[in-house]
Each structure stands twice: as C-alpha cells, then as structure tokens.
Image (cartoon, rainbow, N blue to C red):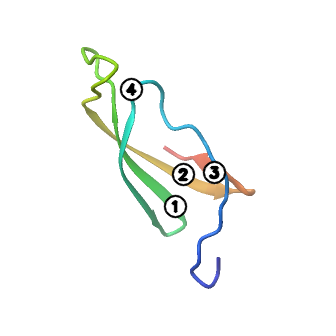
Amino acid sequence: QSDGSLKFAGTTSVGGAGNAINEVTVEEGAVRLKTLTLGPDDPDCCPSVEAKVEYLLHNGKLKQVN
C-alpha cells in the first residue's frame, strides 16, 4: 500500500516436488525468493541446487518474472 503496509495479494505455487524456500524478501515492488531445487542426483527429500525466483504484482495477481 502507499502507506507502506502490506495487503494480501494472492497465492501461487513455487517450483515442484522437493523445492525448499530459504529466504523471502519484498523490495521495490517485487517478491524475491531464494530456493533450493532438486539437482539431477538429489533424492526428493534433499534439494541442493540454489535458485532465485522473483514475482511482481500484475493486475492484482502475482506473476513470475524470472
């Protein structure tokens, strides 16, 4: 919001089986996630590949931009 408060915008799935979210930041209008995803030899329980995902609010919905 213009006063700096947060307002619920919606939900979205992030990644697939085996993903883990390590960090969430909200800055400059973007929701940024640091995640772990499954590598080629990882069992479903133990993702090891670091990744970053970014979402922007577009027409009232979260849209992945990378």
Please identify the quarter of the rendering in which residue 46 is found: top left
**Picture quarter with the N terminus:** bottom right
**Mark nearer the N terminus (2 vs 1):** 1
The local secondary structure at tag 1 comes to: strand
| In contact (CB < 8 Å): disc 3 and disc 4 | no
Residue assigned mark 3? 62
Residue 18: mark: 4
Report the mark closest to the observer, 3 or 4.
4
| In contact (CB < 8 Å): disc 2 and disc 3 | yes
Q: How far apart, in angstroms, are the residues tagged by discs 4 and 2?
A: 20 Å
The local secondary structure at tag 3 comes to: strand
Please identify the quarter of the rendering in which residue 41 is found: top left
| In contact (CB < 8 Å): disc 2 and disc 1 | yes
Report the mark closest to the observer, 4 or 2.
4
| Residue type, label 3 | Leu
Answer left or right for 14 relative to 46: right
**Mark nearer the N terminus (3 vs 1):** 1
Q: How far apart, in angstroms, are the residues tagged by discs 2 and 1?
A: 6 Å
Q: How far apart, in angstroms, are the residues tagged by discs 3 and 1?
A: 9 Å
| Residue type, label 4 | Gly
Answer left or right for 22 relative to 3: left
Q: Alpha-carbon neighbours of circle 1 within 10 Å: few (<14), some, or many (≥20)?
A: some
Residue assigned mark 2? 55
Q: How far apart, in angstroms, are the residues tagged by discs 2 and 3?
A: 6 Å
**Mark nearer the N terminus (4 vs 2):** 4
Q: Residue 48 location, x and y as percent?
A: 24, 30
Q: Residue 27 location, x and y as percent?
A: 46, 68
